[in-house]
Amino acid sequence: MAKRYLTTEQRKSALKLAYADRDWVSKVDKMPPKQIYAIFNKLKKDGIINLDGHGNVFFRTREEVNELKERRDGFHQITLDEYMQSKKDI
């Protein structure tokens, strides 16, 4: 299957949908094309913005991305709260 390329406007629309925030949308509207591409590529690399096999855009939350990463890597980075809880249990 041929790789699908998104236009700047399509990337801009995806960035607006990535976060449900009016301030973010107005910031995206003011961004130059290079910044649109940079942020889009960063969010795509992080796994927040995704393209399916047909080139359709879909999104994951930061929590979903972190959970997938943990499953893929096979480990969990302990949080400070978890550490403190384990100290109480001793």
Image (cartoon, helix red, strand yellow):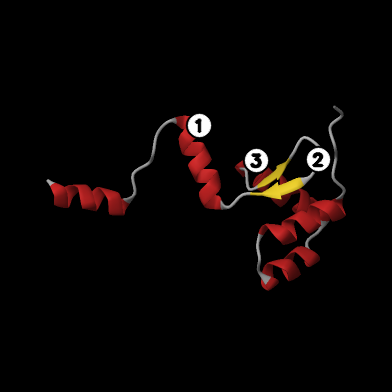
**Quadrant location of the N terminus in the rendered image:** top right
Badge 3 local density, few (<14 within 10 Å), some, or many (20+)?
Answer: few
> For mark 2, what is the residue?
55
> For mark 3, what is the residue?
45
- Whether residues under marks 3 and 2 lie with C-beta atoms below 8 angstroms apart, the answer is no
Q: Is residue 20 left or right of residue 32?
A: left
Q: Secondary structure at mark 1?
A: helix
Counting from the top left corner in percent of width and height, residue 80 is at 30, 52
> For mark 1, what is the residue?
72
- Work out whether 4 lies above or below 37: above
Q: Secondary structure at mark 3?
A: helix
The residue lying toward the viewer, choosing from 41 and 22, is: 22
Residue drawn at (28%, 50%) of the image: 82
Counting from the top left corner in percent of width and height, residue 26 is at 75, 70
How many dots with numbers? Answer: 3
> Who comes first in sequence, dot 3 or dot 2?
3
Q: Quadrant of residue 81?
A: bottom left
Q: Secondary structure at mark 2?
A: loop
Q: Report the amino acid beneath label 1.
A: Arg
The dot on residue 38 is none
> Who comes first in sequence, dot 1 or dot 2?
2
- Work out whether 70 lies above or below 35: above
Q: Is residue 83 left or right of residue 71?
A: left
